Image (cartoon, grey):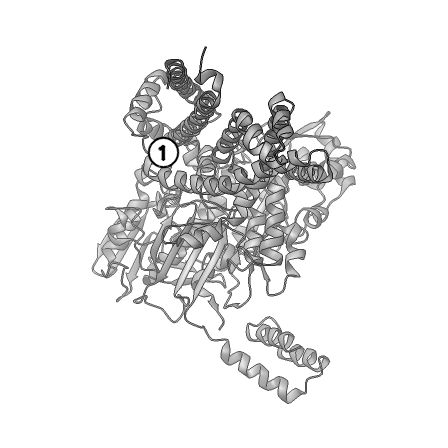
Amino acid sequence: MTSELDYLSRRVASGKLSRRDFLGRAAALGVAAPFANSLLSSAARAAGPVKGGTLKAGLVGGESTNSLDPALFMTQVPFAFGKCWGEMIVELSPDGKLENRIAEEIGSSDDAKVWTLKIRDGIEFHNGKTVTAEDVAATLERHSDEKSKSGALGYMKGIDTIKVNGKEVVLTLKEANADLPYLLSDYHLIVQPNGGKDKPDAGISAGPYKVKVNEPGVRHVGERFANYWQGDKMGHADQIEVVVINDATARTAALQGGQVNMINRVEPKIVDLIKRVPGVTIRNHSGPGHYVFIMHCDTAPFDNNDLRMALKLAINREEMLNKVLRGYGSLGNDFPINASYPLFTEIEQRKYDPDKAKFHYKKSGHDGSILLRTSDVAFPGAVDAAQLYQQSAAKAGIKLEIKREPGDGYWNEVWNKQPFCASYWGGRSTQDQMYSTAYLSTADWNDTRFKRPDFDKMVLAARAELDEAKRKQMYHDMAVMVRDEGGLILPMFNQFIDATGPKVAGWVEDPHQELSNGYALAKCWLEA
Amino acid sequence: MSSPVVKLVAQRIALGVLLLLAVSVLIFAGTQILPGDVAQAILGQSATQESLANLREQLGLNQPAYIRYFHWLGGVLTGDLGTAMSSGQDIATSIKERLWNTLFLAFWAAIVAIPLAITLGLIAVRYRNGWVDKLISGVALASTSFPEFFIGYLLVFYFAVQHQWFPAISTVYEGMSFGERLQAIVLPAAALTLVVLAHMMRMTRAAILNVMQSAYVETAELKGLSAFAVIRKHAFPNAIAPIINVVMLNLAYLVVGVVVVEVIFVYPGMGQYLVDHVTKRDVPVVQAVGLIFAAVYISLNIIADIAAIVANPRLRHPK
């Protein structure tokens, strides 16, 4: 009983359970109200960050080919370890706003073309040097250079000049962009001494942990950086460790066996089993990631909007959400934006409607079966999802033929090449980023071949618009256009499902990425 | 030692070297026909035509294949395995530690598995066709028939999750003490032992039973020697050649066939290293690892051959 009460009081302290509910549960356990109240206050006192200990994470997404060069980060382990040792110019805060880090202040000219970053005083790199405006400028320069092969290159190309003016960095853009601060929160843009131009993979920045061990594909260890500039907020454990565990079963076993304190990517099908393990807490949160079926709008038969509409209406979203994601997700509505974006607006939910689908299918004049390509790597459960789709479409008289492609080479040979296939998107932090990456006529990754000059104009106009209300309306119109005329079939948004072991406290829910946007190791602590 | 043996041994070694050279050609050709190329694999989803062309140029992928082969072979012979395309690290340095880990695991698995298999084989012969024999064979065959990932997960479930006697993951790293390392590899070593046990045990049993039919064994029995003494002194030495063969085959398997076990137990060995680089199309690494695996396999087979020759009195004492 005591452990149950302990558990409940910790839930209250971490905001998971209301005080009233707690007292009710305590009464049910036969505890008098005054005693329960005193328990609660001691839990709240204990809930402050505890310093010390080693916090370990067992994560999927690390290979022996990983590097500490932030420009080359691609998978989850470099991403999460990077958040431990790296410091950003600006970061997305868990409530969807911006949190200034190395930049103390970010301002723009009225036309959103010239941006000024004021660099904060007194931030120190791990090597003892002070972070200067020159370092920030050099970092941005390096990531704008084709040679760095930076994952942020796409956005950085939009920057025309980077100048240092005392303690300020002044950026002039080629075209106005009201979202520039969001772009600067890209996880590749870790500020390094002299921008990392001397040694890109030195692993030195100004984050809460110093790189102590770096064995790519095996483990990464960081030790607390004593001079971290906001040590009260992050860096509670003395040491953090990322162990690469790519096998899902091994990851779960390591959490259960107590070798690690947290893991990422719990498979939806085992969440309900893991939940029952004493001490383990499932941390699931919806984000911008989504699973999709994509049609090329410029390739027959998908160049016919009636056929596209028929296929959109012939998918049973709720069934797919329940069977493939076991409910750990939310319904998609055929445009790539959901509530995790700051300027999201609701649009009427599209439903499974075999009759309407039949109508549009007939109108399109198409006859015969339609080939849908899928693969295990397209998204977890993509093969099952395709089969569900086949069944729901059959009820509307549409015959889908499913081809299971090998996972090896799927992203080179099928995705963005074949006219109809399964895929996924991790999402972006702003609508502009998402639409610019995959829906502009000129985008390399326009995987639905949605080429509409009127839409392109709307993207550019919205990007330059500083009035939030007007912008919201523009994004609403764009979403409607993609939803009703595009080649995207988006049945569901997935959730990040992480799990923590006993004694892990301080978890922050963050809609942007898994593991509290990568900060779980830096923000959590171990209770005594 | 007489000359026919020396000649035979020399022949075997020469054949081995030739074979290794042939394997190197095969490995090189094989990596060339993998779908996609390394530039595409490095850039992944973010590949554009421009960046692909630049990277191909930079990595020298535009040269003809045979020139790249001789270039590579020359490097290998001088101990230079090149640098990994995906991470830019020196391959020889990264492989050294991985190879050492793999050998460490294989060594301890072998230390347990080989004596255990042979002893069990001897016991099975002693009590042949009785319930002891059937029990040993049955259990050993069952453990071999299960896929190794199944055995691995069973061990993890029972010893790591239910009882927490041993860690579920076997990550080893520099700075770990010898004892800690041993504790970390208990489960994978046990899984490997169970996988290779039956093959060696059954072979020992069959080889000795074969010899047991011979006249001199009967003589020994008639002299009044105990059953174990007959097996140990008369049957076993004469059955050693096939046993060594199968032991060597299994040793080779312990080094080159542990990919699945390494993945399940998150053990940083060669198998995991190879898998990572295959998915990245990191051709130089795949070639280097392939060559090392081939070398291990071929040399263990040569040792088995030589041991069989040396153990065979008819070859040692030609008429």
Image x and y of residue A24, in percent:
69, 80
The residue that appears at 44% across and 54% down in the rendered structure is B180
Viewer-proximal residue among B297 and A518: B297
Viewer-proximal residue among A360 and A525: A525
Q: Is residue A178 visible?
A: no
Q: Chain of mark 1?
A: B
Up the image or down, A19 lies above or below A422; here it is: below
Up the image or down, A289 lies above or below B245; here it is: below
Query: In the displayed image of the protein, which residue is found farthest to the top?
Result: B319
Viewer-proximal residue among B68 and A488: B68
* Lateral position of residue A108 relative to residue B319, left or right: left
Residue ID for mark 1? B85
Image x and y of residue A158, in percent:
35, 44
Query: In the displayed image of the protein, which residue is found farthest to the left?
Result: A166
Image x and y of residue B271, in percent:
47, 37
* Lateral position of residue B67 relative to residue A97, left or right: left
Up the image or down, B33 lies above or below A380; here it is: above
Check disc 1 and give the amino acid type: Met
Q: Quadrant of residue B147?
A: top right
Q: Which quadrant does the N terminus of chain A fall into?
A: bottom right
Image x and y of residue B78, in percent:
27, 26
Viewer-proximal residue among B101 and A314: B101
Query: In the displayed image of the protein, which residue is found farthest to the front?
Result: B223
Q: For mark 1, give the secondary structure.
A: loop
The residue that appears at 24% across and 51% down in the rendered structure is A194
Rate crowding at label 1 as few (under 14), some (14 to 19) or many (20 or more) other CA atoms within 10 Å: many
The residue that appears at 70% across and 38% down in the rendered structure is A389
Q: Is residue B315 visible?
A: yes
Q: Quadrant of residue A380?
A: top right
